[in-house]
Image (cartoon, grey):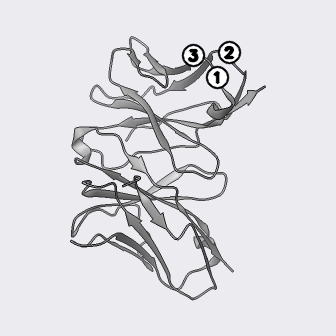
């Protein structure tokens, strides 16, 4: 699976929107973009995934650049419970594994 | 079924002992993945199994580590003759379909292994 680049850490004020960036310049045409998050002392939790078009679900939105070399996870209104490490992952159709990298540690300030 | 169940939650072993980590996948899921997370690092893939078969073990250390997913019962990750470097959080994930369907993974809460 191709690798991704994310900032090590970000901060956000509570109830403000958060934009978490991810660069994946070596993405192939068939790689899906997945986001997971890991709360302290817990296993990762699925957030959202997409291929080319922007995606929305109850947790977040995923904005994918037109050239697909980058994407942004958008939390519309950060809460204290959103404090976690967010992983951006590329998944090839035949890949058995998700490459997690080190992710972005999000701190939410009350 | 509350989801993916891992036990024990915490496991302490002395150097040279064996560690057995168990994972019961989500009901109906027949695909299991094991990951290891060292302190301050991301998760590293270890092995992917289906019922009674190892599909991909490219992330497993060549010695002391083994995994199984029998027809009946949980998946087991076994570490023989543990060393201090094996101390880590071990996570199990399961999915309904195989990897090619691009389905999301459902993770357990992990087993924290500490080797004294």
Q: Position of residue B57 (x, y in %)?
A: 33, 64
User: Against B73, is A84 above or below?
Assistant: above
The kind of secondary structure element at disc 1 is loop
Q: In which quarter of the image is the C terminus of chain A?
A: top right
Foreground residue, B44 or B107? B107
Residue wearing tag 2: A16
Considering every residue shown, the one lying at the far right of the view is A110
Quadrant in the rendering for residue A21: top right
Judge if badges 1 and 3 mark residues of a common chain: yes
Report the Cα–Cα distance between label 1 and label 3.
6 Å
User: Against B41, is B11 above or below?
Assistant: below
| x 45%, y 80%: residue | B64
Query: What is the chain identity of the residue bearing mark 2?
Result: A
Image disc number at residue A78: 1
Q: Give the side of residue B1 with respect to residue A99, left or right.
A: left
Image disc number at residue A76: 3
Query: What is the chain identity of the residue bearing mark 3?
Result: A
Q: Give the side of residue A52 with respect to residue A61, left or right.
A: left
Query: What is the chain identity of the residue bearing mark 1?
Result: A
Q: Where is residue A46 in the image (x, y as percent from the top left)?
A: 44, 38
Foreground residue, A66 or B21? B21
Q: Quadrant of the N terminus of chain A?
A: top left
Q: Where is residue A102 in the image (x, y as percent from the top left)?
A: 59, 43
């Amino acid at each position: 699976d191709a690798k991704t680049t994310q900032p090590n850490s970000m901060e956000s004020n509570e109830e403000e929107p958060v934009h978490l960036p991810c660069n994946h310049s070596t993405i192939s045409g068939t790689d899906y973009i997945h986001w997971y998050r890991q709360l302290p002392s817990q296993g990762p939790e699925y957030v959202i995934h997409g291929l080319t078009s922007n995606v929305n679900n109850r947790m977040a939105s995923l904005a994918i650049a037109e050239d697909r070399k980058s994407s942004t996870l958008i939390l519309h209104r950060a809460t204290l419970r959103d404090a976690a490490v967010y992983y951006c992952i590329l998944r090839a159709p035949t890949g058995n594994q998700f490459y997690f990298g080190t992710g972005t540690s999000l701190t939410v300030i009350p | 079924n509350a989801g993916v169940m891992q036990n024990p939650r915490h496991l302490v072993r002395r150097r040279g002992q064996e560690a057995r980590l168990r994972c019961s996948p989500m009901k109906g899921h027949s695909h299991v993945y094991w990951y290891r997370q060292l302190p301050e690092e991301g998760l590293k893939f270890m092995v992917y199994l289906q019922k009674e078969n190892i599909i991909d073990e490219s992330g497993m250390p060549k010695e002391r580590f083994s995994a199984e997913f029998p027809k009946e019962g949980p998946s087991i990750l076994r570490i023989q003759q543990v060393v201090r470097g094996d101390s880590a959080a071990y996570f199990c994930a399961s999915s309904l379909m195989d990897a090619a369907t691009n389905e999301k993974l459902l993770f357990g809460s992990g087993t924290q292994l500490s080797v004294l």
